Image (cartoon, rainbow, N blue to C red):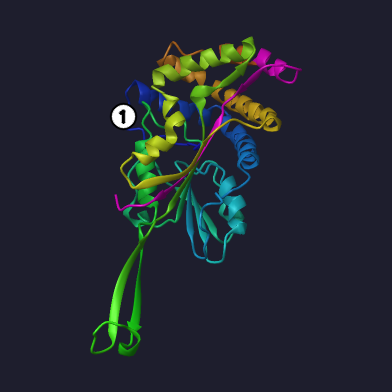
Amino acid sequence: MSSAKNATYLLKQDGAEACRHETFHFFQSRGCANRAPRRLASQHLVWQLHTGYSLHPKIEVRDGMTIADLGTGTGIWALQLAPSLLPNSKIVGYDISDAHLPHKEYWPSNAEFGVLDSMKDVPESLEGQFDVVHIRMWAYIPRENDPSPLIRHAAKLLSKLKKSILYFVSFLGFIQFKIDSWTKLTILFTGPGGYLQWEDARFGSFVTRGDAACEIRNMLDRVHLPSKLDFQWLEELDQHVQSAGVGFEVLDAQYGTWAPHLRPLAISNTMLAMQNLGAALDGLKQKFPSIPSQAEWLNSLEPLDASIGKLCGGQLYWPPVTLLARKYSQA
């Protein structure tokens, strides 16, 4: 998930946006920042083992391609991919904050990182500059079941339709047309543009086993309600991307679950996220009394944590969704 040191991009301070602002603020100020790299590393590992790739195998890899990673966090996906790119290629990781970005001394020669608000309009200098846009773990950002601002942002970053002109010359003696001289014919070919690669968490379809897991699931609903979080769009991600009106055609979309051998890692990553969330709750509760307190939250996590390692013990994890789309029109 995109990290955030400063949530100044939240301009509408109504109840939902205030909750969103406070969540980011308290995640940063209550010590969550120190735990975030561990959670993001665990998250990256489970995704890597699940998909088996960094860059989707259907993406046409070429020399000189440019890739944007939105919500890059610690940059772990970009840092892993960079050494495998062809010469003259470049990857740029963007986040709303530089809180967890790698220091410049650790950047590979073909990677760089910067601050960008992906819920706002794309700067003119970045429009159409990328062959691939990668998005991962943005489930908590869109509100009211509407990911279209993020989809439009990604579309503007992507390269537009590629056009190539083929010239060929035909000599009078080799063609059957009645042409008096050399003929130069121009044919305009139009090809597809850039790719959108997306991996996310279907938080609306949490898998639970045991009373302790169900209790946490119910408490999560109390957290989500005042912030107007609706995760249904993640169950229909391909439809939202296809119908966003920005020229995407979905090439691949997978709504599945983790393989059995990956579920312990998925559960562990979920528990790290739940612990991080607990650090934000007291501040949120001041504005939204229905939200559980940090003490209430942590007390409920303890029995779940204790049961997870046992035979037929507790389970709490989100199932994944992956998507690949390509820009096929100038919309």
Q: As displayed, is residue 169 above or below residue 129?
A: below
Q: Nearer the viewer, residue 312 or 28?
A: 312
Q: Is residue 312 magenta?
A: yes
Q: Is residue 90 left or right of residue 146?
A: right
Q: As displayed, is residue 285 above or below residue 146?
A: above
Q: Nearer the viewer, residue 103 or 137?
A: 137
Looking at the rendering, the stretch of residues picked out in magenta corresponds to: 302-331
Q: Nearer the viewer, residue 34 or 180?
A: 180
- The answer, for residue 17, to whether it is visible in the render is yes
**Residue that extends furthest to the front in the rendered view of this protein:** 176
Q: Nearer the viewer, residue 52 or 150?
A: 52
Position of residue 198 measured from the top left corner of the image (x, y, whole percent): 49, 42
Q: Is residue 115 left or right of residue 188?
A: right
**Residue that extends furthest to the right in the rendered view of this protein:** 311
User: Count of labels shown?
Assistant: 1
Position of residue 285 measured from the top left corner of the image (x, y, whole percent): 46, 15
Q: Residues within 10 Å of mark 1 (few under 14, many from 20)?
A: few
Residue 44 sits in quarter? top right
Q: Amino acid at mark 1?
A: Lys
Q: Residue at x 39, y 40 (%)?
A: 241
SS at mark 1 in the image:
loop
Q: Is residue 311 left or right of residue 290?
A: right
- The answer, for residue 293, to whether it is visible in the render is no
Q: As displayed, is residue 148 above or below residue 248?
A: above
Q: Is residue 145 magenta?
A: no
Q: As displayed, is residue 69 above or below residue 162?
A: above
> Which residue does the numbered mark 1 point to in the structure image?
12
Position of residue 179 measured from the top left corner of the image (x, y, whole percent): 24, 86
